[in-house]
Amino acid sequence: MDDNKKRELLEKVKEYDVRFVRLQFTDIAGILKNIAIPVRQLEKALDGELMFDGSSINGFADISESDMYLVPDPDTFVIFPWRSSNGKVARFICDVYNPDGKPFSGCPRNNLKRVLKEAEALGYTMKVGPEAEFFLFLADENGQATTQTQDEAGYFDLAPLDLGENARRDMDTTLEEMGFEIEASHHEVAPSQHEIDFKYGEALGVADAIMTLKLAVRSIAQRHGLHASFMPKPLFGVNGSGMHTHQSLFADRQNVFDDPGSPHGLSDTARHYMGGILHHARGITAITNPTVNSYKRLVPGYEAPVYMAWSEQNRSCLIRVPAKRGLSTRIEVRNPDPTFNPYLALAVMLKAGLDGIKNQLEPPAPVDRDIYKMDLAERNRLGIESLPGNLYEALIELARDEVVKSALGEHIFNKFIEGKMEEWNQYNMQVTPWEVSQYLTRF
Amino acid sequence: MENTRIIIADSRENSRKILQESLNRCGYQIQAEIRNAPELLRRARTLYPDLVIIDANIEGGGVFEMAGIIQEDEIADVLIIAGNDSRQLKDFAHIFKPYTPETLEAAVEICLLYKARFVQIRQQVARLQEDMRTRKLVDQAKGLLMQKSGLTEQEAYRRLQKESMNKGMSMKDVARAVIDSNK
């Protein structure tokens, strides 16, 4: 890091009386990891000399290669607007490096940078705009999360304000203080479900921002006696939480998806990118929907996509093309959910799109009817396939798709499959209340 | 006193009762009785009490974290009732158990007194800040008038004043209008 930047950062932490600095990175499973250092160690950290034991992070490294370095990205410096008992806390998002000074291939952020470079070599910058949905539940008497919503809580004295709305307003202000440009923030379809959208930006920054948003939302919820959950389907029978991902490619500050002269106002590049996403959709799903619970959301009837098609209106499709054109021309991929690792999810979607451009993959004609209402024969006739039905099927599809695999790199692919197969097997061994209620007395 | 809104938060029924009775004896009404930390945060944020009295043994979250959040977000003042001493207690108003109703009453009154003074000072600071902002704008507008119309400082000021009276606008708005029209 250059000396001026370093001096500037060191002065800033002094000015704001920051006591601790959190060095953050995201593991393969998409969990934000923190190493807190006292401020006096910051200079050493900024020089990339701070070592940590990589083998302690699940799916990261084996014991034999455990020494790793965290290299903070100076552009990610933020002072958390909320205080902790230790005073002001600042953070950096870091890249993980091997002792030999090379980027560690198991670091999802490094990996996204690698795929973004492939796009750059073709002259493209990826722009992304996410829509984050989550539930606000009540925390119980032990401070633990519940799936109880405020509406069920039955307060005896009337609260003048909705607890959730109040908390979300606080989240918006906090995120704005952290540099977010909030575009929309509203109550969602299900009770106690909320959505916060921020302005689209370049892929790496947006992946960082998604991790930051999740942290901020959860921290603020806690300060309101609530628990924020990004679990895709916490309650049976109501809409789940997704992370619709709007995306477009730019070249020389121009949106290359836009072409007013073409059908639908979409350029060949946009059509082929979409063709690529649809072609690789079954392979991508394990990454964009990486938990057992993700597939409880991807069922017909709750505005979540199940079928691989695209449309300009229809929300039952995998891809929707919003009406805006010009600089805002984009596609909205609707299956991702907030349990995804944003670095990996953006890498695989971009790679699939680029593959579509490279091989000029054509998407089928748009489907403007509600696919939920079609039967199998009709879907077959129109060539509409389904997304994988569960995590296991998705993992098999991922292993089959060389393009998607190459977007992850060998290390991440292997560790991901290993960890997720274990998750699936654990789930598979469970005897669920549903089974008991169905079979216990019948047989 | 009867308008004072107090919330008490204590997980143990017995000590909550002692607290409630002591407060009642001093003539205070309790707005809500709370049993755990998350509920405290939820209720405090919707009831806007003047004072929150928290027992240090509150369950479901650390007392200092709760007290810190309530004070930082300026929801209410906090009084902690502690069983034993700790370093973090010094950041908050507190009394120790066992306490007499007189001790509690004194502590509550001091909290409320300081709260009233604090609100007064804060209002004063806000007024001063507003005055400072106005003066800055007026100075800038004066400078513009002196430069453009060749007025003396006094004349420029009088013109702003006159304009303010004629139009029924504040000095600040007049000054801002002058600055905007010269942009």
Image (cartoon, rainbow, N blue to C red):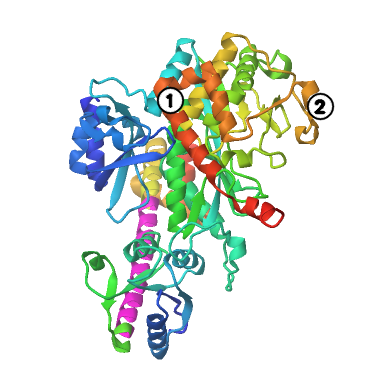
Say which mark, if any, is on residue A414. 1
| Above or below, B60 relative to A297 | below
Bounds of the magenta segment: B105-134
Point 29% across, 72% down: residue: B93
Q: Residues within 10 Å of mark 1 (few under 14, many from 20)?
A: some
Q: Secondary structure at mark 2?
A: helix
Q: Can you give x and y, in whole percent of width and height, for residue A292 in the image?
A: 55, 40
x then y, percent, for residue B52: 40, 72
* Chain at numbered mark 1: A
Between A201 and B33, the one nearer to me in the picture:
B33
Q: Main secondary structure of the magenta part?
A: helix
At which x and y percent is residue B55? 35, 74
| Amino acid type for the residue under numbered disc 1 | Asn
Left/right placement of residue B100 relative to residue A430 reads: left
Q: Which residue is mark 2?
A: A377
Is any atom of residue B54 visible in this view? yes
Circle 1: element type? helix
Q: Residues within 10 Å of mark 2 (few under 14, many from 20)?
A: few
Subunit of label 2: A
Query: Is B108 within the magenta?
Result: yes
**Residue at the image point whose x is 54% and y is 60% from the top:** A163
Q: Is residue B45 left or right of residue B97?
A: right
Q: Position of residue A331 (x, y in %)?
A: 62, 25
For the residue marked with disc 2, what is the amino acid?
Answer: Ala
Residue B46 located left or right of residue A11: right
**Which sits in the foreground, A418 or B158?**
A418
Q: Say which quarter of the image contains residue A62.
A: top left
| Quarter the N terminus of chain B occupies | bottom left
The first of marks 2 and 1 along the sequence is: 2
Q: Residue at x 38, y 85 (%)?
A: B18
Q: CA distance from mark 2 to mark 1?
A: 37 Å
